[in-house]
Image (spheres, rainbow, N blue to C red):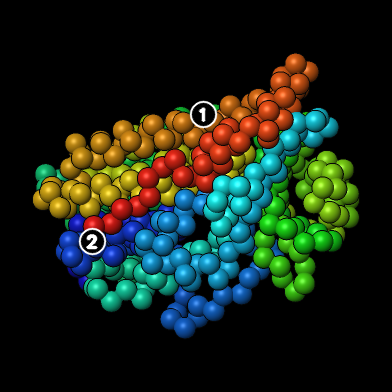
Amino acid sequence: MRKHYDLVIAGGGMVGASLACALLPVAQALQLKIALVELQPLPPPGENRFQPSYDARSTALAYGARSFYQATGVWQRLREHLTPIEHIHVSDRGRFGVTRLHAVDEKVAALGYVVENHWLGQVLLDHIRQDDSGCLDFICPAEIQSFTPCEDYSLLSVKTPDGPLELQTELAVIADGGRSGLREALGISCDEHSYGQHALVANISLDQPHQHIAYERFTDSGPMALLPGETLDGEYRCGLVWTLPDDEVARVLALSDAAFLQQLQQVFGYRAGRFVRVGERYHYPLKLTLAQEQVRAGLVVLGNAAHALHPIAGQGYNLALRGVTDLAENLIASRQMGVSLGDLARLQLYEQRRKADQLRTIGFSDKTMRLFSNPNPLLSLGRSMGLQLLDVCPLGKTLFARTAMGLDSPALQLPR
């Protein structure tokens, strides 16, 4: 195993693995040496058969993610277990306002896609493991415990079952999630704001096909989303994200399946059909998080380790993926210029570009959540009028759809 790498990625989840996939097509030409350090052990080769799970957590990919995964060479396999979103229905419960978006109107195959996290992770890791360029090493199970900057490189202390390792690298990328121990160990604090809400997540079966419709429904207790999923064993499955006040979540979790479905039906209505089954229910607190530092010399904080936002518009992973795109292009350009990947001035250019996108996306989700959670009658009337006006304004719908699909951001550009 090497002791020196150009890039070390801490975290082999969806964000860290996507960054590795973005760089692999050019790694050999640019003589990049990459290490991916992951805490969880990899499954043995051959144990990669995928079986969709009724209770699997899913992610909504914006349409713009398609071009990223096409450029990295994983789209053909990834699409085997994707559910396209062909229609989006946005409404305010009990009020007249509604906006409907349709893929055919925007001249795209889909407005987005729903994917099981396990399938996305498997496809990315399989793609990396099958690479024969010799440019990437997996180091797992392992954990980076310290980061020490030196003059021309950084020193990483890595804990493995076989003993400690010391690695040198031009750049370390922290992509190990919102509870990043390495970020905390480096004293990188976060600005946090609690919404006083929990997201309750579960899979729901309908008594009729979902017709590839994604619903965003605003209710008095908070927004809820219903995402179309893969049909399993003849059951029409959707992914539910239900926002609940902190003091309500325990009561709703304690309901029997029948009582839960009854309350969900009462709150959501019958537009999608009847809810006939619910799987395991998960929940997590909702808060807005933004790392105060996202770059240092030789260091980048990426994905959930850098930011977390309200799931109201389903933009969390898509924001992270745009960060992966910008970072990959920054590193490729640095290499072509003969500049260290950890050069602070180059990384600050990346940070400036990301901050604008982050603040815009976080601001949109935060303001939308606050607007649609406010019970003020005048605001309620204004919301309904706004949704209705948007529904009859083709230009407004196109601009809204392009933003939701991530088409207002440049696609990943790899040198030929």
Nearer the observer, 227 or 103: 103
Quadrant that contains the C terminus: bottom left
Give the label, 1 or 2, closer to the camera.
2
Give the percent coordinates (x, y) of residue 324.
37, 50
Residue 373 appears left or right of 353: right
Q: Count residues near mark 1 (Cα–Cα under 10 Å), then give few for <14, some for 14-19, many for 20+.
A: few
Residue drawn 62% across and 62% down? 83
Q: Is residue 268 visible?
A: yes
Judging by the rendered image, the residue that carries numbered circle 2 is 416
Amino acid type at mark 2: Arg
Cβ atoms at labels 1 and 2 below 8 Å apart: no
Q: Count residues near mark 2 (Cα–Cα under 10 Å), then give few for <14, some for 14-19, many for 20+.
A: few
Residue drawn 61% across and 59% down? 84
Which label was assigned to residue 413? none
Residue drawn 46% across and 31% down? 360
Q: Is residue 312 above or below residue 235?
A: above
Residue 384 appears left or right of 62: right
Residue 273 appears left or right of 26: right
Nearer the observer, 270 or 186: 270
How far apart are the two marked residues, 1 and 2, measured between alpha carbons? Answer: 36 Å
* Residue reaching furthest to the top: 378
Residue 386 appears left or right of 266: left
Quadrant that contains the N terminus: bottom left
Judging by the rendered image, the residue that carries numbered circle 1 is 363
Q: Is residue 243 visible?
A: no
Q: Secondary structure at mark 1?
A: helix
